[in-house]
Amino acid sequence: MGSPSFFFRLFLFITCLVHLLYFLSVYGWGLYSDRSHIVTGNLTILLWHWPFGPSYSLKGDVCWDRYRITGCRLVDQRSLYPSADLVVFHHRELMTGQERLPFHLPRTRHQKWVWLSLESPDNNGDLKPFNNVFNCTMSYRRDADFTIPYGKLVPKDRDTGNYSRTENVIPKNKSPLACWVVSNYNPQQKRSLVYNSLRESIKVEVYGQWDGRVLAPSNLLPTISRCYFYLAFENSISKDYITEKLWRNAYQAGAVPVVLGPPPNDYMAVAPPNSFIHIENFTSTKELGNYLSQLILNKESYAGYFAWRRSHQVKVYTDWRERLCSICPQYHILPAQKVYRDLEAWARWGHQVR
Ligand SMILES: *[C@@H]1O[C@H](CO)[C@@H](O)[C@H](O)[C@H]1NC(C)=O
Ligand SMILES: *[C@@H]1O[C@H](CO)[C@@H](O)[C@H](O)[C@H]1NC(C)=O
Ligand SMILES: *[C@@H]1O[C@H](CO)[C@@H](O)[C@H](O)[C@H]1NC(C)=O
Ligand SMILES: *[C@@H]1O[C@H](CO)[C@@H](O)[C@H](O)[C@H]1NC(C)=O
């Protein structure tokens, strides 16, 4: 039998070793590190130009003051470029040629250039000129370095409302069966084909520019809340592309979303089970129409689609500052070095390119 103190010392040694390895894996260690270098103090994020033009105030400690995120310094003065840990470029202005990448400025070893876009691949144009430039991606994609969804569900504050029955969280006075808001109608798009076929079996109320029934922003949610279903049909079908049509127009308004977009698995990854109806689940629009007409006759089944509303509420992201501040809590999990050699392949086909 060995002496107990030997085993005790062995135990201590292994414990220390495990801790050491843990800290190395978390904080990185020189060449062996696979993580981003540790920023002491604040992480400086430079927004090279504001998306779509309008700028917002970055006075004070904006990430802390507005979103309670610490250690995050968000700036938009280009003179701060040399000290920036990350430089964020919104794609639209690069694509149109309104803004250019500052290739003439040296990059420090750790500085990362971030490609930012909330558009689907169909609306990003040719990305080949941007190959071999960016170190990070920022988009709605779940596999982007910084994921910025259009919306999500968050736990509800427990002190408001009555959670005892699901029916209590469903808006009352519903009448049109399904509603659709569409501003750019293109008869060739899949969503238009589905709409035209679906309205042969159920009543679909259409609003928006296309039909000349434009809803004022303050009228949008109250109008949709009177519909049993909302056609949350995306204008572009691609991986993870799930927009405010789901989060705001359907969930927030209180209509059950009938979704057309990426495959069911993409929705299931971000939305509660049994909270939406995916058109791919039906072999025809007639079958879908029948399902919808039957569903509203069964109050309990219909109410089941709102079960999440007892415990959760919708958060929709609209402020670029909030999206940019969200970089900070996601930063530490990035690899130290990464280059998107083929941004086009990543954006269009979802290839992971390092
Ligand atoms: C980080 O930013 C805050 C708010 O702007 C500031 O008060 C603090 O001194 C900064 N810390 C460092 C280490 O620069
Ligand atoms: C919540 O709703 C249930 C059923 O409608 C009702 O019996 C109950 O009194 C309500 N509770 C509160 C606190 O309003
Ligand atoms: C698809 O159909 C299956 C089987 O009827 C059902 O369990 C599931 O909830 C449906 N999913 C969606 C997204 O409609
Ligand atoms: C960022 O990308 C550039 C351009 O390809 C590359 O030279 C640089 O090493 C990368 N930096 C990091 C921190 O990944």
Image (cartoon, rainbow, N blue to C red):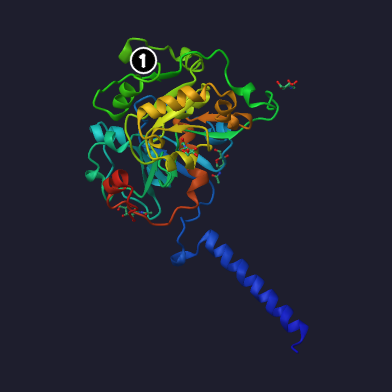
Q: Is residue 19 left or right of residue 279?
A: right
Image location of residue 144, percent across then percent down? 40, 46
- Give the image location of residue 245, x and y in percent: 42, 27
Relative to 9, does residue 319 appear above or below in the rendering? above
Left or right of 261 on screen, residue 12: right
For ligand 4, the image quadrant comes to bottom left
- Between 282 and 311, the residue placed more toward the observer is 282
Quadrant of the snapshot with the N terminus: bottom right
Residue 212: image quadrant is top left
Q: Residue furthest right?
A: 4
Residue nearest the observer in this picture, 120 or 26:
120
Residue 183 shown left or right of residue 148 in the figure: left
Q: Amino acid at mark 1?
A: Gly
Q: Using the rendered view, name the quadrant where residue 45 is placed.
A: top left
Q: Is residue 320 visible?
A: yes
Q: Nearer the viewer, residue 82 or 65?
A: 65
Indicate the secondary structure of the residue bearing disc 1.
loop
Front residue of 69 and 208: 208
Identified at 58% across, 26% down, the residue is 303
Residue 139 higher or lower than 26, as above or below: above
Q: Which residue is mark 1?
A: 208
33 lies above or below 133: below
- The number of callouts visible is 1
Q: Position of residue 172 (x, y in %)?
A: 58, 15
Furthest-bottom residue in this view: 1
Q: Which residue appears at 53% of the width and 51% of the height?
A: 40
Residue 326 is at least partly visible in this image? no
Q: Quadrant of the C terminus?
A: bottom left
